[in-house]
């Protein structure tokens, strides 16, 4: 199993009396780290996953079942990004533009949730549709906060890159210029 088991302790109980938590290290490798779950990004992804699942369940139970695919897809995407961020796959797979994919996921989710929530609340009269619409509005807010924070991080990164690029371009231009001021 991965991670490898540590060296056996001589003070451990005999093999006949195995402890119940002995098999857990393999399963714990799949769980997100506590530090990530306590971070702002981890909390947002947990909220997105939870709200998407609740909204999906509400749409399944409602007469507005035509809208259930959007929360299901957003739930699965949020779960994938939660797993990818928790396992730090964004650091391992550098070929993908993770911030842009996460930004587009959040923007499209916020817009879709907003549209289907308005429709569910306005057009359908059953309680499950109203509940799905309300949870959809909450999900819209959470996704909007997430894409706002991602946008600010990307803007800071690009601003730092532009200032470094401008100074290098200015130095190269000064070195290559032939200005004879006689």
Image (cartoon, rainbow, N blue to C red):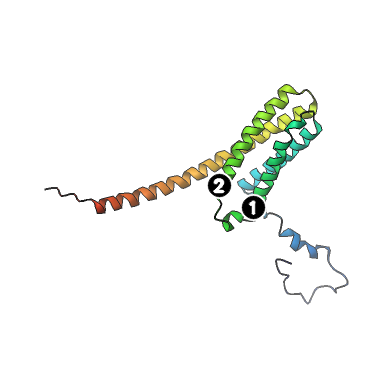
56, above or below 82, in the image: above
> Residue visible at 76% across and 30% down?
131
The mark that comes first in sequence, 1 or 2, is 1
Label 1, label 2: how far apart the Cα atoms are: 12 Å
In this rendering, position of residue 136 left or right of residue 151: right
**Residue 173 place in picture, x, y as percent:** 28, 50
Report crowding for label 2: few under 14, some 14 to 19, many 20 or more residues within 10 A (C-alpha): some
**Residue 91 place in picture, x, y as percent:** 57, 56
> Residue visible at 88% across and 72% down?
16
Report crowding for label 1: few under 14, some 14 to 19, many 20 or more residues within 10 A (C-alpha): some
**Residue 72 place in picture, x, y as percent:** 72, 40
Q: Give the residue pinned by disc 1.
A: 84
6, above or below 137, in the image: below
139, above or below 45, in the image: above
Q: Label for residue 109?
A: none
Q: Give the residue pinned by disc 2.
A: 99
Q: For residue 93, which quarter of the picture?
A: bottom right
């Amino acid at each position: 199993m991965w991670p490898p088991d540590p060296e056996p302790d001589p003070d451990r109980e005999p093999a006949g009396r195995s402890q119940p938590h002995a098999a857990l290290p393999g399963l714990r490798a799949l769980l997100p780290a506590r530090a990530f779950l306590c971070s702002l990004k981890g909390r947002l992804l947990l909220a997105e996953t939870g709200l998407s699942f609740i909204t999906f369940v509400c749409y399944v139970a409602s007469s507005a079942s035509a809208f259930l695919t959007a929360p299901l897809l957003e739930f699965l995407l949020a779960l994938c990004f939660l797993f990818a961020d928790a396992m730090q796959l964004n650091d391992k797979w550098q070929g993908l533009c993770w911030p842009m994919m996460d930004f587009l996921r959040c923007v499209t989710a916020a817009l879709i949730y907003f549209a289907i929530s308005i429709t569910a609340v306005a057009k359908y009269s059953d309680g499950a549709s109203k509940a799905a619409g309300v949870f959809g509005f909450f999900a819209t807010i959470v996704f909007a906060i997430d894409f706002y924070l991602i946008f600010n991080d990307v803007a800071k990164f690009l601003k730092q890159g532009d200032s470094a690029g401008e100074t290098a371009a200015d130095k190269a231009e000064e070195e290559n210029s032939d200005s004879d001021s006689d």
